[in-house]
Image (cartoon, coloured by chain):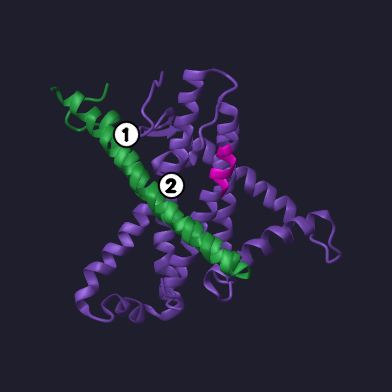
Chain colours: A purple, B green
Amino acid sequence: MMDHSPLETHLLFHIGPVAISEAVVVTWGIVAGLGIASFLMTRRLRAHAGLKEAVLELIVGGISDQIRDAIRQRPDPFLPLIATLFIFLVVANLTMQVPGVTAPTARLETTGALALIVFFAGHVYGIRARGLKAYLTHYVRPNPLLLPLHVLAELTRTFSLMVRLFGNIMSHELIVALLLAVAGLFVPIPIMALGILIGLVQAYIFTVLATVYLAAATGSFET
Amino acid sequence: MTIETLSIIGAVVAVSIGAIMPAYAEGRAIAAAMEAIARQPEAAGPLSRTLFVGLAMIETMAIYCLVIALLLLYANPLVGAAP
């Protein structure tokens, strides 16, 4: 019924010594598609907004409003990273609706990479906003005894960011595969429709949590 | 009982308990949010955003149990080489 475990990587081909998995190819496709689309959309923007400008303004303005609502401060410093994450996650989560394609976020390595981006971006934003010394001393505030707890909190929240997205998307694909094997062709369709909702909600949650973590690292927002 | 049988029982117990408790917790969280929205409908926006993030936090526990169960079934370190 299921020929391979949801935890192991599904290799497609090798480039030299590097094995290329299916998730990597799909991710490349999404990155290329989004990159070309963004390039074409932002070329020759006009002040008199047409359809293209309206769509772009809707997306960027909507994400920016959500960031402002979540952390109650200026969204500009976070907007590039957060908006990129959100748009990528929405597209990546929705690729599971395409027949024959596994969503890259249903693989542990993709979500691990995304969580690591948030992890390192937190340090970069924190150092940039507060300076290296002030950023490092926040680990020993209010008491040096809390240092292990601070470190543990950073590690576990990165881990949970990774496992949450992976678990939700992977379990959904597993359910669809199981239903298809047990019940036939048309039964999984409502569940697949639910998958659109799950993908969007998980993209939203990942982005909101990343925003909150980044804002917390800059010290202007308490988690 | 072999390790395989024990692993399957372990996976079943992990998923069942790991589904019951988060479901209960999510129910309580949603009930509290509903009550708050009924009292103050104008606060529905921030409340539902916080609710979503909180639900995701709770749901993570269930996902952890699912991952443990899948590890037991597919990548069990005690069974030897993966089939």
Q: Which residues are magenta?
A: A194-200
* Mark 2–mark 1 CB contact (< 8 Å): no
Residue at image mark 1: B70
Q: Find numbered disc 1 in the image and state the secondary structure of the residue it sits on.
A: helix
Q: Is residue A114 left or right of residue B62?
A: right
Q: Name the quarter where the C terminus of chain A is drawn.
A: bottom left
Residue B10 position in % (x across, y down): 23, 33
Return the mark for residue A9: none
Q: Find numbered disc 2 in the image and state the secondary structure of the residue it sits on.
A: helix
Residue at image mark 2: A111
Residue A76 position in % (x across, y down): 60, 71
Q: What distance separates the C-alpha of mark 2 from that of mark 1? A: 17 Å
Q: Specify the subunit that label 2 lies on.
A: A
A71 versus A131 height, above or below: above
Is the stretch drawn in magenta largely helix, strand or loop? helix
Amino acid bearing label 1: Leu
| Viewer-closest of A8 and A200 | A200
Question: Which residue is painted at 69% across and 52% down in the image?
Answer: A39
Residue A73 position in % (x across, y down): 56, 76
| Viewer-closest of A63 and A125 | A63
Q: Of tags 2 and 1, which is closer to the observer? A: 1
Residue B44 position in % (x across, y down): 60, 65
Question: Which residue is painted at 21% across and 30% down in the image?
Answer: B7
Amino acid bearing label 2: Thr
